[in-house]
Amino acid sequence: MVVSRDTRHLPALVSPADGPGGDDGRRTRPKVRYAEHVHIPTDTVDAVVVGAGPNGLVAANLLADAGWEVLVLEATPTLGGAVRSAEAIEPGFVTDLFSAFYPMAAASPVLAGLGLERHGLRWRHAPAALAHVLPDDRVALVSRDPAETAASFEAFAPGDGETWTEEAALWRRIRDPLLNALLSPFPPVRAAGRLARAAGTADGMRLARMVAMPVTAWTGERFRGAGAPAVHAGNALHTDLGPAQAGSAVFGWLLSMLAQDVGFPVPDGGAGALTAALARRFTARGGRIECGRPVSRVLTGSGRAMGVLADTPVRARRAVLAAVPAPLLYGRMLDERILPPRVRGDLRRFDWDAATVKVNWTLSGPIPWTAPEAARAGTVHLGGDVAGLARYGLDVELGTVSDEPMLVIGQMAVADPSRAPDGCESAWAYTHVPRGLDWDGDRLRRVTDRMEALLERHAPGFGARVRGRLVQGPRELERANPALVEGAVGGGSAAMHQQLVLRPVPGLGRADTPVDRLFLAGASAHPGGAVHGGPGANAARAALARAGVGGVAYAAAIGGLHRLLYS
Ligand SMILES: Cc1cc2nc3c(=O)[nH]c(=O)nc-3n(C[C@H](O)[C@H](O)[C@H](O)COP(=O)(O)OP(=O)(O)OC[C@H]3O[C@@H](n4cnc5c(N)ncnc54)[C@H](O)[C@@H]3O)c2cc1C
C-alpha cells in the first residue's frame, strides 16, 4: 500500500487539549499545536486502527474491503491482542497465551463473512465440546451430538435430557436472528424483528424473562439433577457473571447452546492461527500493520479525530478506530476535557470484569482424570455444583480469594494433536480472582498452588506429569497486552448494568463516540467480550456511514443524540 507523506494541504495536527468544537457550532481555535511534529514526514491514511487484537483486525478488514487505506498500530511487538500462541514454555508445545477456544467465532456471522478459511484458518474439534467435573467427580458433558448431551444430563435426573432437547430445539429456531441481533449495530431493528418472529410471542416472553434471571433460579426451575445446572452456571462464570447474578441465565444458556451447536473449536496450530488469517486477509488487500507502536494520543481538531500520535503523528483522513478498552481510550488517549462531563463521570463508574490468574503447563501425558469422560472434552470446567459456583462468584465479587475456585481448563491436544509432541499435552487453566489486590509473588503462588491441588484431587498424578509451567497473573497478563487491565478478560463486566445501551457507559450502544470520526472498536463496546468481531465490525460500519454520502446527516444525528444524552 502507498502511504501519502505529503502534508502540505492538510490542516496542522492539534492537541486533544483544544477541547470540543466544530460541527456543533462551538468552534474553538487550536491553543496548542504539535509544532515539533509539523515538519516530520507524516503517514496519511484513510483510517488508523489502534490495537491489533481480533476486533481491530476485523475493523481493518472491513474498511480495506471498502477500498480504504488502513494502518493498524499495535503497542506490543506481536499481533493478535488476546488471540496469540507461542512455544512459550518448551519447543514442540504450543501454548495459547490468552484465549483458546472459540464458539462465538465459529458462530459469528461477522467472521463468517470474512471467509477466513480461505486465508488459512482451519477449525479443530475435540470429541466433546465441554465437560463440567463436579466435586464428586461426576461429569456433565456437552457434545455436538444432541443425544449424547441429553443422555449425560438424563443420568443425573430423569427428565433433564428431555428439557435439554427442548432448549436445543428452541435454539435452532432462533439461532440466526439471535446472533444477528446480538452482533449488529445498535439498535438492531430488523434483526430484532426477525428474532421476535422466529421465537413467537409465547416463547419470546419467556426468553425475555430468562434474560433477566440468575442462572441459579432459571436452572432450578427447569432441571432436577446437578449436571445441567452446573454446566449452565459454569458457562455463566466463564462469561464473568456469578450464577446468582441477574442476567447470568442467558449467558449460561448462550454458551451452553453454542457448545452443543458449533462446539468449542480451536484453530489448527494454535490461537495465533486465527490472528494470522485475519492479518493475511487484511494485508492481501493492501492493509498495513505496525507492531511496537503504542498510540499515546488521539489527535483532534475542530472537535473531530484527525489522527493519532504513535511516537510520530499519523493522519487519518476519514476515521480513527480504537480497538482498546474504553477507559484507555477516553482516560489516556484523549484529553478528558474534550469529553462531556457526564461521560467522564460515567467512566469513573466503568465496571471492569474480574482479574485473572492463568497457569500454562507442558505435560508428559494427558491429564489423568479420575472421570474418564473428562478426557474427551477440549474444555473442562472444574469446580463446585451450582451452589458452590454461586458462592465462588460471590467471593470474587466481594473481593475474597476463594478457597473453592472454578477453573476453566484447556487440554489443547485433545482437539488439536499438533499442539504437543506425541502422547504429551499442552494444557492451561485460569480462574477469576478479585480486582484491586496486590498480586505479589506470595498471593499469586497461593492461588496457583490451590489450582494445581484442585487438579491433583480430580486427576491424581497430574503434578507428576508437569514438565514446565508458565504463570500469568494479573500483572503479567496486562504487561503482555495492555488492554487486559488487571487481567480483565472481557473488556469490562458483562453484567446487565453494562450491556446494550449501557455499554461501555450509558449512551447509544453504538461505536460512535462524543468525538466525531472517532469510534470505539474493542470489547468494551457493545456487544462485548469474546472473539466474534462484533465491536470491530460495528465500528467499521459506523466509520463507513460517517464517511459516506449521508455522512453529514449521520454526524448531525449522532451529535444531536449525544447532546441529548450527555448535556
Ligand atoms: C486469558 C483470556 C482468556 C480468554 N478466553 C477466551 C476464549 O477462550 N474464547 C473467546 O472467545 N474469548 C476469550 N477471551 C476474550 C477475548 O480474547 C477478548 O474478548 C478479545 O480478544 C477482545 O478483542 P479486542 O480486539 O477488543 O481486544 P484485545 O484482543 O485485547 O486486543 C487489544 C489490542 O490493543 C493493543 N493496545 C492496547 N493499548 C494500545 C495502544 N495504546 N496503542 C496501540 N495498541 C494498543 C493491545 O496490545 C492489544 O493487542 C479471553 C481473554 C483472556 C485475556
Image (cartoon, rainbow, N blue to C red):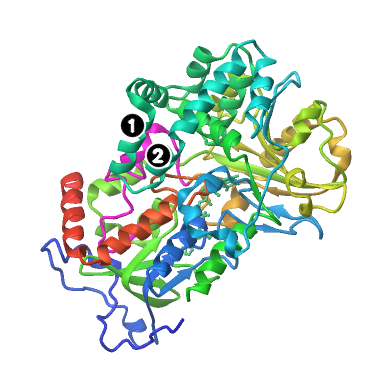
Under tag 1, what secondary structure?
A: helix
What's the magenta region?
491-519
Left/right placement of residue 435 relative to residue 305 reads right
Magenta-colored stretch includes residue 512? yes
Q: Residue at x 64, y 59 (%)?
A: 273
Q: Residue at x 57, y 43 (%)?
A: 103
Q: Give residue 480's position: percent from left, percent from top.
A: 60, 57
Distance Cα–Cα, label 2 vs label 1: 9 Å
Few, some or many residues within 10 Å of mark 2 (<14, 14–19, 20+): many
Q: Pointer 2: what residue?
A: 177
Residue 182's mark? none
Check if mark 2's residue and mark 1's residue have beta carbons within 8 Å.
Answer: yes
Q: Residue at x 76, y 43 (%)?
A: 414
Q: Give residue 100's position: percent from left, percent from top.
A: 64, 48
Q: Pointer 1: what residue?
A: 197
Report the amino acid beneath label 1.
Arg
